[in-house]
Amino acid sequence: MRILLVNPNMSTDMTDRMADIARRIAGPDVDIVPLTARSGFPYIASRAEAQIAGGIAFDMIAENLAGADAVVMAAFGDPGLRGARELFDLPVIGMAEAAMLSAAMLGERFAIVTFSPVMRRWYLDCVHDSGLMGRCCGVRTPKAHPADMASMRETLRADLVALARQAIDEDGAEVIILGGAPLAGLAPEISDMVPAIVIDPIAAAVSQAIAMVRITTPSGFLDRQYRPLPKQATGLAPALTDILAGQMRQ
Amino acid sequence: MRILLVNPNMSTDMTDRMADIARRIAGPDVDIVPLTARSGFPYIASRAEAQIAGGIAFDMIAENLAGADAVVMAAFGDPGLRGARELFDLPVIGMAEAAMLSAAMLGERFAIVTFSPVMRRWYLDCVHDSGLMGRCCGVRTPKAHPADMASMRETLRADLVALARQAIDEDGAEVIILGGAPLAGLAPEISDMVPAIVIDPIAAAVSQAIAMVRITTPSGFLDRQYRPLPKQATGLAPALTDILAGQMRQ
Amino acid sequence: MRILLVNPNMSTDMTDRMADIARRIAGPDVDIVPLTARSGFPYIASRAEAQIAGGIAFDMIAENLAGADAVVMAAFGDPGLRGARELFDLPVIGMAEAAMLSAAMLGERFAIVTFSPVMRRWYLDCVHDSGLMGRCCGVRTPKAHPADMASMRETLRADLVALARQAIDEDGAEVIILGGAPLAGLAPEISDMVPAIVIDPIAAAVSQAIAMVRITTPSGFLDRQYRPLPKQATGLAPALTDILAGQMRQ
Amino acid sequence: MRILLVNPNMSTDMTDRMADIARRIAGPDVDIVPLTARSGFPYIASRAEAQIAGGIAFDMIAENLAGADAVVMAAFGDPGLRGARELFDLPVIGMAEAAMLSAAMLGERFAIVTFSPVMRRWYLDCVHDSGLMGRCCGVRTPKAHPADMASMRETLRADLVALARQAIDEDGAEVIILGGAPLAGLAPEISDMVPAIVIDPIAAAVSQAIAMVRITTPSGFLDRQYRPLPKQATGLAPALTDILAGQMRQ
Amino acid sequence: MRILLVNPNMSTDMTDRMADIARRIAGPDVDIVPLTARSGFPYIASRAEAQIAGGIAFDMIAENLAGADAVVMAAFGDPGLRGARELFDLPVIGMAEAAMLSAAMLGERFAIVTFSPVMRRWYLDCVHDSGLMGRCCGVRTPKAHPADMASMRETLRADLVALARQAIDEDGAEVIILGGAPLAGLAPEISDMVPAIVIDPIAAAVSQAIAMVRITTPSGFLDRQYRPLPKQATGLAPALTDILAGQMRQ
Amino acid sequence: MRILLVNPNMSTDMTDRMADIARRIAGPDVDIVPLTARSGFPYIASRAEAQIAGGIAFDMIAENLAGADAVVMAAFGDPGLRGARELFDLPVIGMAEAAMLSAAMLGERFAIVTFSPVMRRWYLDCVHDSGLMGRCCGVRTPKAHPADMASMRETLRADLVALARQAIDEDGAEVIILGGAPLAGLAPEISDMVPAIVIDPIAAAVSQAIAMVRITTPSGFLDRQYRPLPKQATGLAPALTDILAGQMRQ
C-alpha cells in the first residue's frame, strides 16, 4: 500500500517528523511517500492561506498520483479536503477530520487543544464543516501566539497539559485532540499527564487512510456518479490539467 | 492484535459470515474472536431488543476481555455502545457508527439502505445519536418487511440497488451504507451496480477497530477521569460484576 | 388510575421517598405502585450502569404490568426509556425527559443542577437525546463527588442554591431542574432561595404520567404500526419473554 | 383549580367545543373558564394575525386573572405564548407546544396533520421555535384550502386519515398531532383508523395545564428574576396596564 | 425611495437619533419617514412588551403605507417582524435581523453586546429565530441594569468596549453588533477601541432596506402565494382592518 | 464607490452580462470593475474547481485592489469567500451567501432552483456553510445536465418555473433564489410566473456590497484582531505576495 503524505506547508522539518510518525503507525508493509510544498507558506494559519495551499496540494497529489492508494492531507485544518476528495479517485484523508471522527469513536465528546489563539477560528470552522459540532466541547488555546515556533513544543508543554485538563474538568471532554501539525508527535509524550484519551492527528490520519483503502475498491471511486465532469482547464500545472480533463486516472 | 467480534444476536450463521469478512479485512496478524449471544434474540429489530441485547453484550465482553485489544459490536444499531465504551478499557467500535464515520471520510453526504421498514426508525436514532444527521441523506428501505429473512439477500438484491440509486439521484448521496447485519458482505457484490462508494459495515467496523488500537494505548483508557466509579453490583454475571467493581481490568 | 413507579436502583429508601412525593402529587384517586430493583446497583451514575438497569427495569415492568395505566421510570437519566416506550402498550414516562419537557412549558430556557460532576456527561446525553439542547443552558455541578451520599442533601444544599443562581445569572436560565433521584423532594425546600421556577423531576414525571393517561387510550397503543414484531426470546425472565412474544398484553 | 381557556379567535362555537373537551378531560374538580375574543379574527391563519391576536389574548388574561391557576392559549400556533409566559405569574400553556411536548413523551418522532396548506408555514414556525424540529417528521396538509370551514370536519375526515397514514409510512411518525383549533375533538373519532397514537391538542393543553399547576407554586412565579421590570404603559386596556406596572398580581 | 422608520417605542428622542443616522446612511435621495409609537412603552425590554408593540407597529405601518417602499422596524428584537413581513407587500427589515445577517457577510462569527442583562434572553431568542445561532458567539452584557437610561451611553462606554474585547478574545467574535435602540449611533464612536468590525444596527437596517427595494419589485410581493387570505377583522384600527381585508394595498 | 466584480470563471460573456445587471442595480455613482479569470475554467461546477478558482480569485483581487471599496465574488458557490474575507481589508460579498441572507430578510424560508443536478451538492454545501440550513427548503434541479449551456436560458425556462412552483407548493418556500451565474438576469424575466419573491443573486450581491460599504469603515477592517499574521509566501503572484506579507494594503 502506498500513501501520499502531502504537507501543504513548505517546512521539510515538519514533513520529516510527520513521516516518522506515519511510518511507525503504518508498519513496514505501507509505503509512506512524504511530499513538501515547493510554494506557498512556511505554515498555514488562516483560512486565506488554506485556500491557496489547498490548490497547491492538488498539484502535489496530481504529480504523484501514479501508484498511490490513498492521500493524507497533512495539515490540521484540512486545506482543500472537500475538493480533493471529489476530484481524485482514491481515499483522501484530512488530519483534522480524521482526528475528530476517530475521537467520536473513542468517547462521547472531544475537545481540541492547540498552540495559538490565532488557529482557533479556523479549527472551529473545521469542526463546524465536519458536522460534529454537537460532539465537540470547543477549542482551547494559550492566550498569546508563541514567541518562537521552533521551541514551542518544549515551552508550551505544561500549558497544553493545563488546557487539556480544563477541557476535561470544565467542558466534560472525554477525548483530547492535540491539533496543529507543529504538535505532531507530542500526544504520546503528554498523555500520561492528561486523564483522557489523547489523539495525535497524524497518527489518526494515517490509520484512517489504511482503513479506508481496506474497505474501498478503486472501481468504487471511478464509478461515482458525482465525479466532476471533465473540464478543459487553462493555465494550471500539466498533471492537474490532465486529471481535470478526465485523463490519466490511476 | 486480538479483536472480539461480539454478535449480540443468537444467529451463529450470521456470526460466521461476519467473522469471515472480518478475517479477510484484518489479515493474518489479527486474531478475530467471534462470539455469539447465548440468550436474547435471533436478530435485533427494535429499540427494546437493543436495550436488552446491549446488556447481554456486556457479559460477552466481560467474559472474554482477557487479552483482547478491541471490541467490535457486530450489530447495526450498536446496542450498548455508549455504555460499553465507558466501561471497558479498550476501543469499542459499533458497526453503525463506524460505517457512518467512515462514510463521512469518503464523501460529503451518505445514505443508509436496509432490508426492512421496521429497521428504519431505530437506524435513524443511531444517525441522530452519532451527531452526523447533517451529513446523512436519510434511510431508505423496501415498503414491506421481507417474507423470508434467510433468502432475502437474493430476493431483495435488485430492490436494494434501486433504493441506493434513488438515494444518489434524489437525495444527493455520495456514499451508500448497506445497513443491517443480515446484509453483511453484500456491499462488494452490488457495488458495481451502484454509482457511489458502497460501505460494508462489518468491514468498516473491523478496520476502525484496528485503526483505534494503533492510535491509542491501554494506559490512556485506564487513566480516564470519566471511567465509572467502582460499584458493587448485585445479581449480575461474575465477570461483569468484577469489572463493575473495578477489578480484573485487562 | 394505577401508576408503576419503577426505581431501577436498589435503594428502597429512595423508592420510599419518591413514592411519598408521587402520592402527594397524584392525590388519593391514583394508585402509586413503588417497585425497587432486586438486582443491579445502589444508584446509577454512568451510561454503562444505565444500559444494564434499563433491562432490569423491563423485567420489573413486565412482572407488574397487569392493571397498570402508566409507568414512571424513576431514575434521572431515564434508563431504558426509548425501548420501554416502544415495547409496552401504555405511557412510559422518564424523570429526566418529563422534567425537561415540563421546564420547556414554564420558560424559554432551563438548566440542570445536580450533586456530582460524575453525572454531568450522562445527563448531558439525555438533553441531547431529547432534542431540547437548544433550550438548555447546560448542566451545573459541584467540583467534586460528594464524600457521603446519605448526608449530601444537607451538606450540599447551599452549593446547589449557588449553582442554580449561577445558571440564572450567567446562562440566562428561567427554569431550574434539580436532577438526580437522590435529590428528589429537595426542590420545594430550596425554591425560595432560587429566583426561578424550580422543578422536582419525580413530581414532574408523575404529573406527566397522569396527563398522558388522560389524553391516550389503550387501543391507541395496541394499534401502533411501529410496535416491535413478536419475537421468541431465549434466557430472559418469563413475564418479559411473554411480552416480547406478543402475548399477555394488558 | 381554575383554568382560563383563552380562545384568541372570535368563534364562540369553537370555544364551546373546546370547553366541552376541556371539561371532560379535567373532571369536576377543575373550573374551566372559557373566554372568546371580542375583537380580532374569526380564526387565525397567519403569522400577522397571530401577532395581533396574541396582544388581544393578553387583555383577556389580564381581565380574568383573579383566582386563575393556569392559562390555556386555545389556538394551535400559540399566539403570544412566549410573552404571556413571561408576563403572567402562573403557568401559560400553548396548544401547539403542549401537543408537541406530549407527543415527544409518547414516541420518538411526531408529525402534524392539519386541514389547509395555508397553515403549514405558521405551524412549522411553531415546531422550529419549540426546539423540537429534530423530533418532528413534518407538517402534512391537503393540497387546497377547504371550501367550507364549517363542514370540513366531515368532508376532510378521510383525507386527514390518509395524510396521517402517509406520515407514518413514509416519514416514520410514531405519534400524530391533529393540529388546528377547528379540528378539536376529531382525534378520538379517527384514531381507530390511524396506526399510531393520535393527539388532540386541546386535551393535551388542558392536561398539561393541570400538571404544571401541580408541580409549581405561585411564589415560584413571583420570585422569578426574569419577570419583566415594571413599566408604565400608555393606551392599553386598564387591567393589562396594571399588570405591566407590576400591580394587581394574583 | 421612501422608507418608514417605525419606532415601536414611545421615545421621540430615540426616534430622532435613529432618523439622523438613517438619513446620513441613506443619503439625500431617500425619504426617511420617522414614526414614533403613540401608545405602548417608553422602551421595550421583554417578550411580552414586544408582543404588544408588534401589534402597535402594524397600525403605524398601515396608516403610513401609501407611497412607502420599505419599512424598518426600529427596535432591536424586531417586534412583529415575521407577521409584518407576511402582511405588508413591501420589504420589512428588522434591526436585529439586519444586523445579524450583515454581520454574517463581514465575518464568520459575530457577538452581540448590549447595555443590560435584562435584554439578554430576548436578544438570544432573536438569534435563535434567525437561524444564525451557529454563527453567533453569544450575547454579552454588564452584570446590572443601568441605573439611568439617559446617561448610560456615556457611563457604560468603557464597559461596552471591555465586553466587546472579551467576545473577541474569549469567544472568537470577528464582528460585534452593538444591540439595542438606546445604543444607536454609538458603534462608530467606539469602533477604534474594538479590534473587530463593529455594526450599528440602525445603519445596517436602513442599508438593507435600500438593498431589498433594489432587488425586488412591488408585483413580486403582490403575487406571493403565501400572502394571508383576506380576513374580516373586528375592533382593529381602520387602516389595518383594510389591509387585512385585502384592500388598499399600495 | 468602486466595486470589483470578480468572475472566477473564464467566460467574458458571463462577466459582461453580470456587469450589465450590476450597473443597472448600482446606478451611476458606483464604478463596477468587471474582471474575468485568465486561467482556470469556463465555468465552475464542483468543489474541486472552486478550490482552485478561489485561489485564482485572490490574485484577481490583489492586482486590482487599489481604490476598490468592495469585492463581489461573482460565482454562485462563492469560491474562496471565507479566505478572501479574512485576507482583504474591505467587504467581500459572495453571490450565493448574499442571495441567501437577502432571502432570509424577505421571507421565512427560501429554496434554490438551478439548471443542473451536477450543481446540487456544491450549492447544498454553501447553504450548510452559511448556517442557514434551518431556513432553506432545499435545492431543486432538472433531472439531467443541460445538453447545451449556451441556449439553456431559453430551453430550461419552463422547467425552472415548474421547479420553483414545486418548491413553493411542496416545500413551503416563500422566496426563490435562481442560483448559478449562467442564470444571472433570468429572475426578473420569470418572476411573473412564480408566486413568490424571486431573487437574482448578482443583483443581491451588488446591493449587499453597497450596503456593506455604507455601514463599515476601512479602519474597521485594518484594526481587526483576526487579520492573518504577515507571512512570507513563495511562488505566488507578486500582488498577492505583497498582501500576504502585510504590505500595500489599500
Image (tube, coloured by chain):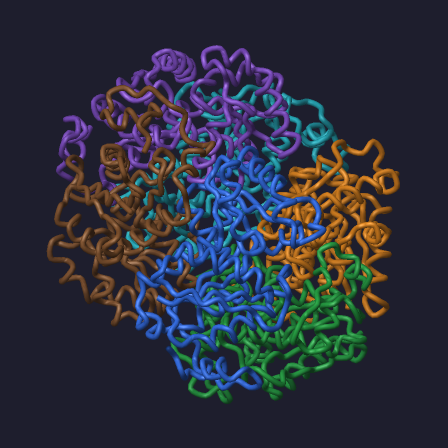
Chain colours: A purple, B cyan, C orange, D green, E blue, F brown
User: Which residue shows up at 29% across the image and 65% down it?
Assistant: F164
**Quarter where residue B174 is shown:** top left
Q: Nearer the viewer, residue B108 or C188?
A: C188
Q: Is residue E224 left or right of residue E242?
A: left
Instruction: Identify the residue at image location x=30%, y=29%.
Output: A52
On-image quarter of the N terminus of chain A: top left
> In the rendered image, is residue E208 in sight?
yes
Q: Residue at x 62, y 46 (%)?
A: E154
Instruction: Give the image location of residue D51, x and y in percent.
Output: 55, 71
Q: Compared with residue A84, is residue D147 higher up or lower down, i.e. above or below?
A: below
- Identify the image quadrant of residue F201: bottom left
Q: Residue at coordinates 73% horizontally, 45% vertically from top-left?
A: C113
Task: Pick whichever, C11 or F11, lies toward us.
Answer: F11
Q: Does residue F186 appear to the left or right of D48 in the view shown? A: left
Side of E231 where F250 appears, left or right:
left
**Image coordinates for residue D172, horizontal then vertical, percent:** 48, 60
